[in-house]
Image (cartoon, rainbow, N blue to C red):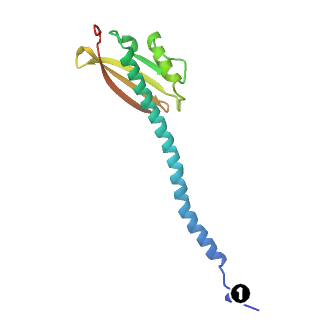
Amino acid sequence: MKNFKESAGFTLIEIIVVIAIIGIGVVPILNYFTNSISNIQETEVRSQAVTIAGDVLELLKQETTTDLSYLTTHFDNSSDSNTAGSEDKVILDAIESNYDLLADFSMDISISNFENNTDIKEVVVKVFWDSENKSEELKTIIRDRTGDE
């Protein structure tokens, strides 16, 4: 008979040490993948927010009249508490219907004179999400097109 000391194989302690070393190496790798997934989801939401703000600016450029006061609004797709007027409500409804929204967005549109020039307006669209903790803002200027033909 052979003695146990002469047998070729691994001891229980060697196996436990190998499992511990592999476990220590695998946990950070799994954590990396988990963080990557949440970062990708956040990037998708941020990208959608920028796209929505850009679409709103483009629609406002197309629909703008000399009276921009009706465009100052707050829009929140998570509730029915929108303070949008009838003209800009149509614009905001069009934006909301074009997207499968990834988050509860709210949006503020503000208009002011650009460098004290009443013929040029600065339009700022700010889109919020994550309980308004995160936001993206886009700005443009719109010229008064009265008399353009």
Q: Residues within 10 Å of mark 1 (few under 14, many from 20)?
A: few
Residue that appears at 37% across and 29% down: 137
Work out which quarter of the rendered image holds the N terminus and state it. Answer: bottom right
SS of the residue under disc 1: helix
Q: Going by the image, does 1 lie left or right of 143?
A: right
Which residue in the rendered view is the most extreme toward the front?
A: 149
Q: Going by the image, does 17 lie left or right of 130?
A: right
Q: Is residue 71 above or below residue 104?
A: above
Residue that appears at 44% across and 14% down: 88
Query: Is residue 83 in sight in this rendering?
Result: no
Looking at the rendered structure, the kind of residue marked 1 is Phe
Q: Is residue 1 above or below residue 124?
A: below
Q: Could you say where residue 72 lies in the image, as x and y percent from the top left?
A: 39, 16
Work out which quarter of the rendered image holds the C terminus and state it. Answer: top left
Residue that appears at 55% across and 61% down: 26
| 117 or 128: nearer the viewer | 117
Residue that appears at 51% across and 48% down: 35
Q: Could you say where residue 43 lies in the image, as x and y percent from the top left?
A: 46, 40
Q: How many marks?
A: 1
| 21 or 94: nearer the viewer | 94
Which residue in the rendered view is the most extreme toward the left?
A: 116
Q: Which residue is mark 1?
A: 4
Query: Is residue 114 in sight in this rendering?
Result: yes
Q: Is residue 106 above or below residue 143?
A: below
Q: Could you say where residue 90 lies in the image, as x and y percent from the top left?
A: 48, 14
